[in-house]
Image (cartoon, rainbow, N blue to C red):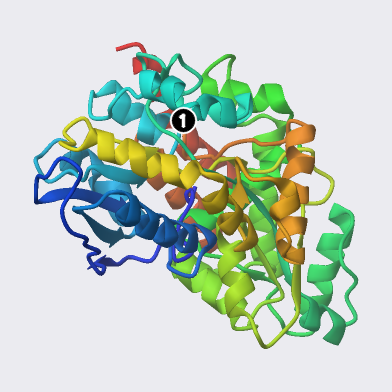
Amino acid sequence: MFKPGKRIGLVAALAMTATVLAACGDDSGEAGNELTLWHYEGPDSAMGVAWAEAIKEFERTHEGVTVTFEAKGFEQIQKSAQMVLNSDEAPDLMEYNKGNATAGLLSKQGLLTDMSAEVTERGWDKLLTPSLQTTCKYDERGVMGGDKWFGVPNYAEYTMVYYNKDLFAKHGVEVPTTFDDLTAAMDTFVKAGVTPLSVGGKEYPAQQLLYQLALSKADSDWVNDFQTYTGDVDFHDDAWTYGAETFADWVKKGYIGKDSAGIDAEGMGTAFMAGKFPIMVSGSWWYGRVQSSVKDFEWDSILWPDSDLALGSSGNLWVVPQNSPNKELAYDFIDITMEKANQELLGNSGGIPVAADPAAITDPKSKVLIENYQTLVDRDGLAFYPDWPAPGYYDVMVSAAQKLINGTASPDEALDELAGPYEENLANIGE
């Protein structure tokens, strides 16, 4: 999720063409070579910083090749990728969301290049752990965990609890170590007239919070059944029911503002970074941006308390559209983002690298970010994202969470809304 992510500079609904970087004459003596690149990371995010440097390195090592970079919004690519990739407007290389509903669907439709041979030849498979490879590989049904590589990530991600240390100190609130501590902290803020949680119900953040609440009562088998169709899924089981009922209760208690149904992810993040809310539950894709932007207060982060599971996975994928005329150049760019120098830059900028030397990550906050990620990996705690299982499920999840916020659906009704499209997709998954 975004990415998700997005975002986070990542879901900014922008469609702007950035500076075109150019050099002169290539090794073959041919002029006019071009690599078109799309991604939706903000320029001050860890990935944005690292990939800007990767563009410079690519230009330095590919004489005569012009890189045309276009910044796209997460929502923009989410909604238009299928149409664009099925046309002659497709870029050569693109960041795209992972999961059955996105990269899996496009792979099934033949819109993405099978990179399996390239992955082996360039050794990318040796850099990615088995858990990270799950979201890169899809079967003929478009279900992740398959046998063919349709994408490669160069970072990882997870969600966490960001908190404003100054607001906690001002209101005498201790850093939560248990779930009861977390709710007690939010009660204290509410009594002081402060809405505790910065939430974006218009896009991915609210649905991710709903899923996290359900995950706190689930286990890895529950996750696998939901994400990879390995067992029956009951949307009125204990975990989903707890998630929906608790989410609705948090709205009633004032933990979540009723106006958040109309707030997007960017609005959620900027409000937290402006010091307007003491807590934000969101992903590591925000980390570098918070790290570089927040100057007026002290902040930190913790893993969601009293839960072995948290949303997380590999980062979004580099995918090569089937219509790309410059696939070798695309592979070369991916290669640069996997090199140690770029990985270490990403890690020290607030991202989670997949192939960096841990000793090279010297920034203190970045070390905490990576250590917490490793804690989740060690306990098999990465539970993916709720919108992955079915095409169009992102909008379904957003709608259900919004209805819980504005009170137009009961928890049972919201869960029914989640069940219908999931079950319909499951019935058609083999087609």
Q: Could you tell me residue 60's position as x and y percent? A: 33, 56
Seen in the picture, residue 205 relative to 241 is either above or below; the reply is below
In the visual, does 403 lie left or right of 312?
left
Residue at the spot 64% in from the left edge and 37% down from the top edge: 240
- Count of marks placed on residues: 1
Q: Could you tell me residue 126's position as x and y percent? A: 57, 25
Q: Which one is nearer the viewer's eye here, 266 or 114?
A: 114
Q: Which one is nearer the viewer's eye here, 274 or 62?
A: 62
In the visual, does 89 lie left or right of 116?
left
- Mark 1 lies on residue: 389
Q: Could you tell me residue 204's position as x and y percent? A: 48, 54
- Kindly tell me whether residue 317 is visible in this rendering: no
Quarter location, residue 236: top right
Quarter location, residue 281: bottom right
Seen in the picture, residue 8 relative to 3 is either above or below; the reply is below
Residue at the spot 21% in from the left edge and 62% down from the top edge: 22
Element type where label 1 sits in the image: loop
Q: Which one is nearer the viewer's eye here, 172 or 292?
A: 292
Q: Could you tell me residue 221's position as x and y percent? A: 69, 21
Look at the image and tell me in which quarter the C terminus lies.
Answer: top left
Seen in the picture, residue 55 relative to 314 is either above or below; the reply is below
- Kindly tell me whether residue 99 is visible in this rendering: yes
In the visual, does 148 lie left or right of 240?
left
Residue at the spot 60% in from the left edge and 41% down from the top edge: 354
Inspect the image, locate mark 1, and give the three-letter code of the amino acid beneath it. Pro
Callout 1 crowding tier (Cα within 10 Å): few <14, some 14–19, many ≥20: many
Seen in the picture, residue 256 relative to 331 is either above or below; the reply is below
